[in-house]
Image: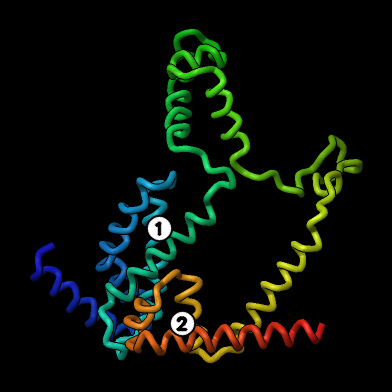
Amino acid sequence: MSTLVTENLKHETLQILRAYQNSRSPKLRNQLVELNLGLVRKEAHHWVNQCQESYEDLMQVGSIGLIRAIERFDMAKGCAFSSFALPYVRGEIQHYLRDKSTTVRIPRRWLTLRQQAMQMTREFQSSYHRQPNDTEIAEALAISIEEWQEIKLAHLNREPLSLDTPIGDGDDDSHCLGELVPDQQYKSFQLAQEDRIRLQQALVQLENRTREILEFVFLQDLTQKEVADRLNISVVTVSRRVKKGLDSLKVSMAGSDNCD
């Protein structure tokens, strides 16, 4: 993109941002999204080769981050909108990929081999009107049958089985997996959930700026320098706010434990 086009984009974005912050018009917000979709495309292109998600899905998720940046941008800070918005776009995609990631990490080579096996199976069925067996698939992929069976097993176990999975045929007599396989760590899990609730309650009690800095550092994975640049404050101030915020959270959660 030429310098002139970039400057025109920045100027037009700032004009619409100014109008949007006065009116909060959905039409203006949509114009801002269209103008700055290049930020989303850049991130989507970066991540599409590092995951199994489609480019279109990454674009949709990144656009949500862009909208959040538009909603939260403060022109009074003097920060360039693109610099402000990019971490929101990147963070939204990263959180999406984190949530979508499988419990079992399957090697990329195995993912490729499985795709090739699916294609080979379709062609085999078309020619022979039956499913190929494991030996035929392994020979077509030029791998051992043991490796092909490991690939199949990894794919089957890529997601955890829910403890709510019903066991049994009858509606009256059916049980869920969790009842038949008692979890000795349930109490620890319950305590972890309670700690998360207490942490959320403690965060709400923090001063707005301190809470904002903690969210940038720990939830959006920004460095303290990136936070300082975004908020137009010094790195020392960010460091002090982080320490102050963590100390306050410890006190709040300790007080909550004593109340229990």
- Quadrant for the N terminus, please: bottom left
Check the image and report above or below for 102 versus 41.
Answer: above
Mark drawn on residue 68: none
| Residue that appears at 37% across and 65% down | 89
| Residue that appears at 91% across and 43% down | 172
Q: In this view, does 75 lie to the left or right of 172?
A: left
Choose top left, top right, bottom left or bottom right for residue 158. Answer: top right
Residue 48: horizontal and vertical position, in percent? 36, 48
| Residue that appears at 30% across and 91% down | 76
The one of 244 and 76 positioned closer to us in this rendering? 244
Mark drawn on residue 60: 1
* C-beta proximity under 8 Å, tags 2 and 1: no
Choose top left, top right, bottom left or bottom right for residue 249. Answer: bottom right
Query: Could you classify mark 1 by the number of other residues whose Cα lies within 10 Å: few (under 14), some (14-19), or many (20 or more)?
Result: some
Residue 238: horizontal and vertical position, in percent? 42, 85
Mark 1 secondary-structure assignment: helix
Check the image and report above or below for 141 versus 19.
Answer: above
| Amino acid type indicated by mark 2 | Ile
Residue 156: horizontal and vertical position, in percent? 61, 34
Disc 2 to disc 1, C-alpha distance: 27 Å
| Amino acid type indicated by mark 1 | Gln
Q: Is residue 113 left or right of residue 170?
A: left
Mark 2 secondary-structure assignment: helix
Residue 63: horizontal and vertical position, in percent? 38, 63
Check the image and report above or below for 206 versus 107.
Answer: below
Mark drawn on residue 213: 2
The disc, 2 or 1, on the residue closer to the chain's N-terminal end is 1
